[in-house]
Amino acid sequence: MRQFLLLIILLVNTQLGFSQQITCSPKDKTAVEEKIQEIDEFSQPDFGNTMVRVGKTFMKTPYVAKTLEIGDTETIVVNLQGLDCTTFVENVLAFSMLLRQKEDSFDAFTKNLEIIRYKDGALEGYASRLHYFSEWIANNAEKGLLEDITGEIGGVEITKDIDFMSTHRDLYPFLSDDANFSKIKASENYLNNQAICVLAQDKIAENEHLIQSGDIIALATSINGLDVTHTGIATRENDGRIHLLHASTGSMEVEVSKLPLAEYLKDIKSNTGIMVARPL
């Protein structure tokens, strides 16, 4: 297993008025500062194009699963050396937000990451992390960071039992704690009373023209207990088609899908369609 030198930092910033507990290696802190410099001139009038430009700077970064499952206490994990599909999207959005905010500090970046990753923008333990991506979309829409446009582009509402974490407790080390388990169960019960909107797989091609570069794409699934199995960022490539910019479990690195999104999804047996969220 690849080892990372981890550093726990308690940051108190009186100017921004917040404190954070962060897990970050010196190498990753330097990587964040270098990334901020790299993207300095990347801001575009269209925020979606900014997202894609920033996202493509991560090309070839290794796919690494479970980078947030560290230690005994939930902290804001900063890791640019390895990304899974969700942390890729979160990091791209956090860096892109810096450009819009005209901020260029490590502190501002980690604050963005906390706002994006946690319910109502605040880390309050393991269960405050937005584990299910349909809730990630809904909560970040409530914060004003994005808009779920799935219904506007042909999606329909569905209901589904969401309970994968509680029914696979052994897969999540933090769920050995009964308090965390109870809170996750409560989150699942809440989600089970909420409909989600999904654009069916066979409707994607005809509605592809309504998807824009920079839209966040979540892959809905037929797997019991799960809402979403993968996520990435839409990018309209030179062929005029929407492709998926993502941390791929196929190539095990960040890439742009060789096939357009509509064709790419046909090879995923469990895929039922997509959710589409547009950063604002």
Image: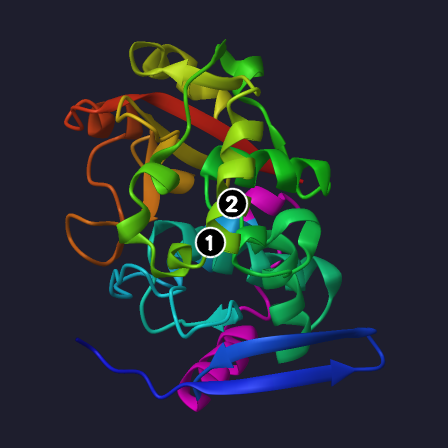
Say whether residue 186 is left or right of residue 203.
Answer: right
Above or below for 72 versus 231: below
> Helix or strand or loop: what does disc 2 sit on?
helix
User: Label 2 to label 1, Cα distance in Å?
Assistant: 6 Å
Mark 1 residue type: Asp
Where's the N terminus, which quadrant?
A: bottom left
Above or below for 255 versus 113: above
Mark 2 neighbour density, 10 Å: few (under 14) some (14–19) many (20 or more): some
Residue position for label 1: 178
> Helix or strand or loop: what does disc 1 sit on?
helix
Residue position for label 2: 182
x and y, in percent, of residue 218 in the image: 41, 34
Q: In which quarter of the image is residue 101?
A: bottom right
Report the magenta stretch's main SS: helix
x and y, in percent, of residue 269 in the image: 16, 24
The answer to whether residue 105 of the structure is visible from this angle is no
Q: Name the residue located 24 percent from the left edge and 65 percent from the top edge.
A: 62
Q: Quadrant of residue 225?
A: top left
| 30 part of magenta stretch | yes
x and y, in percent, of residue 51 in the image: 52, 50
| 78 part of magenta stretch | no
Mark 1 neighbour density, 10 Å: few (under 14) some (14–19) many (20 or more): few
Q: Name the residue located 48 percent from the left edge and 70 percent from the top edge.
A: 77
Say whether residue 100 is left or right of residue 39.
Answer: right
Q: How is the image coloured?
A: rainbow
Q: What stretch is highlighted in magenta?
A: 26-49
- Pick whichever, 222 or 44, lies toward us: 222
- Pick whichever, 177 or 19, lies toward us: 177
Mark 2 residue type: Ser
Are the residues flagged by discs 2 and 1 in contact, CB closer than 8 Å? yes
